[in-house]
Image (cartoon, grey):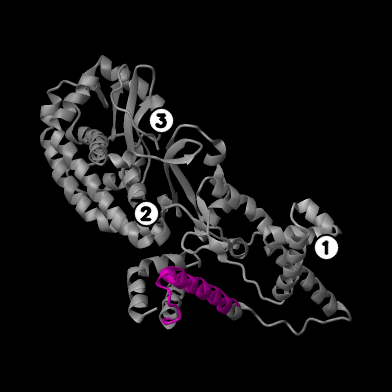
């Protein structure tokens, strides 16, 4: 490995190295120390690899070894001295040593892979002969003898070793699995990550491939329990097996580091683009009012918040028309298609103004009307729908009965078409906003995602850009000062429409 290759790798992957470190230690300061040690180790290891094809595996192997060394040093410094004032009666020390040896043996047995473990248990614990073990396991007598011979060596070496569990063994990481899919509902698939273990397997193998044995130590879970979980993840192609018995996550993960950088990078330009578009839309409100929809008498801010959501939906539809490949869905299981991704943090904890915990292009109120809405995080709680959809049935009926007293806009099919015709340029502008956000997110994600999932980044980011930027657009729209938050008690980013025709449909989040 030439020096410039190591330096270039570090320069291009500085953020990824830090993200790797942050995923494994408890705080930012430790992550910075670990990242520094990884960088030093990579630079010091130049010249130890000749095969350029093995470059990335080599440097991430260095990262994994540096992490293990980091844990050993931290544990050594954290340990206190044995209290010599505790009396030791005859036989106590021997009993403690014997118990420690038994515990060490059990620990090492729990780390054995399935074939070695099952043969060892059958022969030594269940008392079967080699021939009986071979019959029970469905393998040859020679293989049984080979596994038992290898196991003795593995156990002998392992019992005397100091094993260190990873942080996730006592502090599981947060992981949310998101699927945008259609067809063939599968409860098992949708509920995979209702438990902590599968998500922590995914996060542990995201940057660095790991064996079941390594995962066992990282997660503090014996291999017999991990094997079933890994098998289930493999079944749905969410994790892949590699050479050497290692596994690696086959999923793009939207990390906290990526999300914060994306918001910081995109916010200023997104706000500027929205200011131009919303100013233009506001100037056309009187023209739209002349179409005669119910609620036309609402003030500019009330209408502009409602039209913001309409323009977002229509603009994203135009964005997809311009990029038809983003509508394509991959097979995710048994003929069902969709887009999968992961999130490793609490999205509400980053910055509440970027939230949009619920939104819909269609949310039925009754047999006659539906509402389209967005609960932008930048809005006060009183101005969000919060899925109190049924409460709006009476407001809609009152608005239809007396349009002058309407508290929200109510559209017919023709009203929607008329508004979209007037806002044609603004819809094009929103398509450009989504194109900008997509390009920005792809560029940022390419600095955070590991190499093995980078071929998925463009499609996953482009296909989910609407869902993942709704709150950002709401926050940037408020930042423009073109529209203000109305002084009222009702939801503001909302409008209703008749459902006797397929006027406007969309996803609910």
Q: Quadrant of the C terminus?
A: top left
Specify the label residue 388 is tagged with.
3
Is 456 displayed left or right of 227 in the figure? left
Q: Residue furthest right?
A: 90
The total of numbered circles placed on residues is 3
- The residue at which mark 1 appears reads as 124
Query: How far apart are the two marked residues, 2 and 1, measured between alpha carbons?
Result: 48 Å
Residue 170 visible here:
no
Q: Residue furthest top?
A: 401
Q: Are marks 1 and 3 in contact (CB under 8 Å)?
A: no
Specify the label residue 69 is tagged with.
none
Q: Which residues are magenta?
A: 46-75
Q: Earlier in the sequence, mark 1 or mark 3?
A: 1
Q: Is residue 186 above or below residue 128?
A: above
Query: How far apart are the two marked residues, 1 and 3, measured between alpha carbons?
Result: 63 Å
User: At x 12% / y 23%, what residue is drawn?
Assistant: 290
Is 166 displayed left or right of 454 in the figure? right
Q: Position of residue 57 (x, y in %)?
A: 46, 68
């Amino acid at each position: 490995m030439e020096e410039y290759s190591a330096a270039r790798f570090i320069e291009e992957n500085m953020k990824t190295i830090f993200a790797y470190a942050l995923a494994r230690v408890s705080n930012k300061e430790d992550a910075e120390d670990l990242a520094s040690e990884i960088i030093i180790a990579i630079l010091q290891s130049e010249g130890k690899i000749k095969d350029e094809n093995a470059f990335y595996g080599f440097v991430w192997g260095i990262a994994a070894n540096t992490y293990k060394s980091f844990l050993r040093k931290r544990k050594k410094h954290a340990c206190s001295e044995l209290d010599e004032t505790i009396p030791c009666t005859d036989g106590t020390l021997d009993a403690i040593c014997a118990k420690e040896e038994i515990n060490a043996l059990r620990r090492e047995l729990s780390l054995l892979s399935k074939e070695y473990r099952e043969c060892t248990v059958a022969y030594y614990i269940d008392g079967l002969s080699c021939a009986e073990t071979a019959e029970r396991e469905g393998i040859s007598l020679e293989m049984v003898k080979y596994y038992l011979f290898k196991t003795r060596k593995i156990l002998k070496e392992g019992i005397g070793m100091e094993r260190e569990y990873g942080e996730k063994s006592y502090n599981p990481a947060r992981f949310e699995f998101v699927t945008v899919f259609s067809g063939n509902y599968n409860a098992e698939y949708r509920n995979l990550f209702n438990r902590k273990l599968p998500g922590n397997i995914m996060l542990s193998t995201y940057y660095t491939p790991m064996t079941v044995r390594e995962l066992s130590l990282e997660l503090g879970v014996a291999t017999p329990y991990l094997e079933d979980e890994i098998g289930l993840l493999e079944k749905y192609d969410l994790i892949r097996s590699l050479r050497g018995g290692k596994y690696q996550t086959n999923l793009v993960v939207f990390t906290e580091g990526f999300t914060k950088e994306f918001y910081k990078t995109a916010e200023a330009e997104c706000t500027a683009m929205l200011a131009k578009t919303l100013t233009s839309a506001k100037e056309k409100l009187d023209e739209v009012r002349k179409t005669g929809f119910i609620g036309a008498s609402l003030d500019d801010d009330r209408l502009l918040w409602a039209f913001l959501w309409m323009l977002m939906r229509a603009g994203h539809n135009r964005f997809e028309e311009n990029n038809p490949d983003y509508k394509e869905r991959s097979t995710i299981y048994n003929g069902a298609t969709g887009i999968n991704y992961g999130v490793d943090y609490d999205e509400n904890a980053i910055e509440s103004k970027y939230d949009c915990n619920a939104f819909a292009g269609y949310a039925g109120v009754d047999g006659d009307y539906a509402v389209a809405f967005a609960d932008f995080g930048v809005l006060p709680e009183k101005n969000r729908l919060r899925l109190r959809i049924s409460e709006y049935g009476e407001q809609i009926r009152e608005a239809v009965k007396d349009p002058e007293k309407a508290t929200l806009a109510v559209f017919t099919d023709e009203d929607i078409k008329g508004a979209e015709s007037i806002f044609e340029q603004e819809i094009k502008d929103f398509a450009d906003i989504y194109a900008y956000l997509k390009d920005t997110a792809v560029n940022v994600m390419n600095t955070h995602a590991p190499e093995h999932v980078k071929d998925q980044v463009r499609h996953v980011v482009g296909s989910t850009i609407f869902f993942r930027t709704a709150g950002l657009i709401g926050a940037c729209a408020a930042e423009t000062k073109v529209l203000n938050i109305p002084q009222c008690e009702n939801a503001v980013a909302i409008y209703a429409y008749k459902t006797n025709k397929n006027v406007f449909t969309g996803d609910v989040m």
